[in-house]
Amino acid sequence: MSYLIADSGSTKTDWCLVRKNKKAVHFTTKGINPYLESAESIAAMLEAEFPVSQLKSLPDALCYYGAGASSKEKQNLLTGVLKNHFGINKVDVQGDMLAAARALCGDKKGIVCILGTGSSCCYFDGKKIKESHPSLGYIAGDEGSGNYMGKRILQYYTYGTFDTQLMMDFEMRFGNDVRAIVNKLYHEPYPNRLLASFVALLKENRGHYMVENIIEDCINDFFQTSILKYRQSWKKPLYFTGSVAYHFQDIIISLCQQYELEAGEIEQSPIDGLVKYYKEML
């Protein structure tokens, strides 16, 4: 048995071919989110970035986990696209929360959190996701995520809240044409990716009091709206994955201490944990 595993966020997709007694082979493409893209655009991206010829032999099954892939409607859409592109009959599509849970918890119980371009949270009982709150997406929700922080950064720049240093840094990285940025946000694809790209300013200016305030306030909003809504949060460890969680894990650990919660593993991506999970099945 061999598996092609995919872990997809809105910005990036990690692919890995897992075969018995062989080294795992990794691939990377752009992210996939069926709420923001049509079947045709997803198929076109795969054709351009991950042609089937890159696989020397087809795996027996494709196990896909992705942002926006928790509903039956979107799972069916993605299943059709993936079967068509790879020519693999056995395709299983699940939401990204299950990927994070299997990768981080294994068979243990815990609160599983994703903080990347978007954000989400659930309670995992060691086998299944038992509780999860509905996501309002990048427009009305996604607290603590990259696009959530990106909105705050853009506001601070546009309203002149940043000091001179951060104003200049923003302009050096992203330009000073706010109208052009707003036009991209409202008229071009993937506004969530654009907003999340502003987080680079936070990563490079750690220690600045305004930067620290933005990071802590945004992640604290995630604790307030998501984590603290689960009664199990005070009984079980909190596990985190995603680029925002990984780069700002010091803030996460500090907030866990403030709320007297137990911080578990914090990983940038679930892919290594998923590889381990599927290798145990071979």
Image: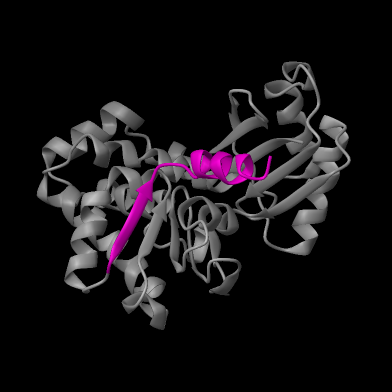
- Quarter of the image for residue 213 reads bottom left
> What's the residue at 61%, 39% (across, down)?
279
Decide: is 231 above or below 133.
below
Decide: is 166 above or below 145.
above
Is 170 on the left or on the right of 282, as rendered? left
Q: Looking at this rendering, what residue extends furthest in the bottom direction?
A: 231
- Quarter of the image for residue 22 reads top right
Quadrant housing the N terminus: top right
**Depth check, front residue: 200 or 168:** 200
> What's the residue at 71%, 30% (across, down)?
45
Asked whether residue 161 is drawn in magenta, I would say no
> Does residue 84 appear in the picture of this structure?
yes
Quadrant housing the C terminus: top right
Decide: is 213 above or below 163.
below
Is 99 on the left or on the right of 53, as rendered? left
> What's the residue at 63%, 49% (across, down)?
66
| Residue 252, horizontal then vertical, whole percent | 26, 57
Asked whether residue 277 is drawn in magenta, I would say yes
**Depth check, front residue: 159 or 211:** 211
**Depth check, front residue: 230 or 206:** 230
| Residue 90, horizontal then vertical, whole percent | 84, 44
**Depth check, front residue: 194 or 181:** 194
> Does residue 190 appear in the picture of this structure?
no
> What's the residue at 25%, 62% (across, down)?
217
| Residue 38, horizontal then vertical, whole percent | 76, 45
Which segment is the magenta one?
Answer: 262-282
Is 117 on the left or on the right of 171, as rendered? right
